[in-house]
Amino acid sequence: MIAFLTARRKGFGWALCAWLVLPPLSGRASESAGSADRSFSGEPKITFEEAHPKKEADQPPQLVAGRGLLLSEVTRKALRIETAPVIVHDLTPQLSGSAQVYQGAAERPQSSSPTRPGGAYATVFIDPRTAEKLKVGNPVRLRHKGQSPQEGTERSGKIFQIDRELVPVTGQAELLIEFPDPSSDFPVGTWIEFTTPLGSDASHLAVPQSALLATAEGNFVYVWDGRFYRRTPIALSFSTDGLVAIGGDPPAGTPVVSHGAEDLWLLELSLRQGLTRGSE
């Protein structure tokens, strides 16, 4: 009998402890059923979330001193930023510049002139040291100044003459370019853009033409370090076939912005103006 009472007391004690420690299952079940009923009834369900710090992907563009532009993923996609590595490529140095037509194809050349009928002739003054690397007869590619180098817009010509007589006076040599112009599309006074080889092939550091940012402050590219876009000055050698040969930094393999460089420059100018106004 005593053993039976003792067992009953022990069983009651365990039951009491379980009741005190464990929450009532029936109440939980009823609450769950009630919440399920409310969610299915179409009533709004409020969910409380922990406050998180603002993600970098949601931040507006920033200009960080000594680092460059910090852009969110949203901004990068909106500007369609693309990068390409600096490469080492065999390129032929080129002389590029602007020249002005001084004799049109429709003009009849004088008997004493070495020019020929049907040809147009343009002139430009260049550095005598550059002139030493050129030869009469070298091929020249040319087009109207300001015209994009698309297929069908370029003309072929050649170096007609290299005049060094005025070097002692002006310090410059005169380069004359000859090209056929049967339709008289290049009358006297027309400005052209030209390119001619300036030596033989050699290995050069190069970036895409679209990566070059030519500004009043100099020539730059935007270097991507994995987080920041840093505007970096470059030493421009020459451009040819969609590539720009550079000297020195940045080294080969460095990612540079190949699409969107001008947009980054405008954004940087805007942020710089904002910083200037904020400091006033």
Image (cartoon, grey):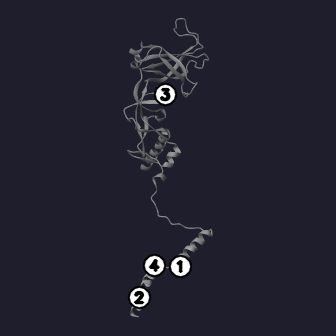
- In the rendered structure, are the residues bearing label 1 and label 2 in contact, judged by CB atoms less than 8 Å apart? no
Comparing 157 with 251, the one in front is 251
Q: Mark 3: which amino acid?
A: Asp
Return the x and y of residue 1 as percentages of the image width and height: 41, 94
- Mark 4 residue element: loop
Residue picked out by circle 2 = 7
Residue projecting furthest to the bottom: 1
Amino acid identity at mark 4: Leu
Residue furthest out toward the left: 248
Cα distance in 3D space between marks 3 and 2 = 98 Å
Q: Which residue was labeled with disc 1?
A: 26
Residue in view at x 53 percent, y 22 percent? 142
Disc 2, SS: helix
**Number of other residues with Cα within 10 Å of mark 2, as a class: few under 14, some 14 to 19, many 20 or more:** few
Residue 22 badge:
4
Q: Amino acid under label 2?
A: Ala
- Identity of the residue drawn at 51% across and 78% down: 25
